[in-house]
Amino acid sequence: MVDSTSRAWSTKAVAAGRPARIPDSPLNAPIVPASSFYAGGVMEYAREAAPTSEALETALAALESGRHAVVYSSGMAAANALMDLIPPGGSVVASSATYTGVRVRLEELHGRGTIRLTQVGIDDTDAVFAALDAASTIAGTPTLWLESPTNPLLEVADLPAILDHARSVGARSVIDNTFATPARQRPLELGADAVLHSVTKAISGHSDLLLGAVVVSDDDMAEALRTRRVLLGAAPSAFDSFLALRGLRTLAIRMDRAEASAQELVTRLRNAPGISRIRYPGWGSLIAIEVDSPPDVIDAMCARAEVWTYATSLGGVESLIERRRRWPLESVGVPENLVRLSVGIEDVDDLWTDLSTILSTR
Ligand code: PLP
């Protein structure tokens, strides 16, 4: 096994989670399709552990600078496992703008009285501090649950300051790092307790699977998260784990390329007519634009794209475009005319020609 702990991040992305260097063993973790393993070992049953997903877990833990990763059948399954660790009646401070599924689920738990939810704008650091201070006066360990950048408003939190404050009031922090990816941000290094990923997105990178993961350093929390996988039944398939591991090998170069194109597109969009706002943190592969047209016109515009693909999701090699409020559960805080652009790795001039054409023929 290569000790990649002291190596650069992009080297770890290539090296981590490989089989031992024994003559004739394969370079890549093989796909092991099995529900049951001969008794007497550590695997036993695939909801508990399985070789292909363990290889992916080894790689994800290395990439996020954690001691353990636990992989689930989707990002939402991973999020639900984390939500299950919140003590009954526990207080949760979460971003008011956040991925729809996570927000709706937290609101559901609040509505049932399972948790006490406070939603804050994460780019208002003082408001996050105040919400954490208030949460810490309620019995039990409070939870801080943030995305940064947020989906789809692309707000950015002052993570070092917020994580510092969360720790000082005894809160457990969960950072959804799906948008930034460990190529751009490693929250455990900043003091977070858990990192959540929709592996479906940039980590796997090819829009061909659903997977989720939580990365932590605390041994007890890792064990509790594994138990949640067993009891919630949210185990990943061997084939999807293999594909995700194969995909993450190229995350560094996919991210560099997509980010460079996103930066160039933002520069060109600044001179494009009929756009009232461009949201872009300055880095990453996601852009959100507000288009001066009614929703039906914007939807038709997205459908006319030829290089861009009119589809939901993000982080894949192919560039995707969609108006987020076409989803009935999307937050009302997201403008009706907000179009999310997930920049892939196509030629930037082709992306621009297609985008400027659909924008100018609304
Ligand atoms: N977190 C974020 C930021 C997301 O964007 C998504 C999905 O879009 C999820 C979590 C849920 O992941 P999945 O779709 O893999 O269940």
Image: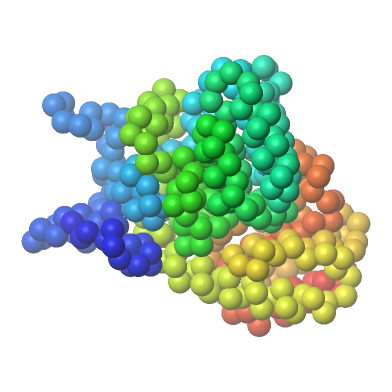
Instruction: Report whether residue 308 is seen.
Output: yes
Q: Determine the residue positioned at 68% across, 29% down.
A: 134
Tell me where residue 353 appears, x and y as whole percent.
72, 80
Q: Residue at x 73, y 78 (%)?
A: 267
Determine the residue located farthest toward the front in the rendered image. Answer: 168
Q: Relative to residue 244, is residue 233 depicted above or below?
A: above
**In the orientation shown, which residue stands out farthest toward the bottom?**
349
Quadrant holding the C terminus: bottom right
- Left or right: 105 as drawn, with respect to 183: right
**Is 1 left, or right, of 35 in this rendering?**
left
Residue 204, given in percent of the width and then of the height, sits at 45, 56
Q: In which quadrant of the rendered view does residue 21 lie?
A: bottom left
- Whether residue 115 is visible here, answered yes or no, is no
- 73 above or below 304? above
Figure quadrant of residue 238: top left
Q: Residue at x 36, y 62 (%)?
A: 13
Measuring from the top left, give residue 323's x and y in whole percent. Answer: 77, 55
Residue 317 in the image: x percent, y percent? 53, 66
246 or 255: which is nearer to us? Answer: 255
The one nearer the camera, 170 or 342, is 170
Q: Nearer the viewer, residue 138 or 354?
A: 138
Residue displayed at 55% across by 45% down = 163
Marker count (numbered): 0
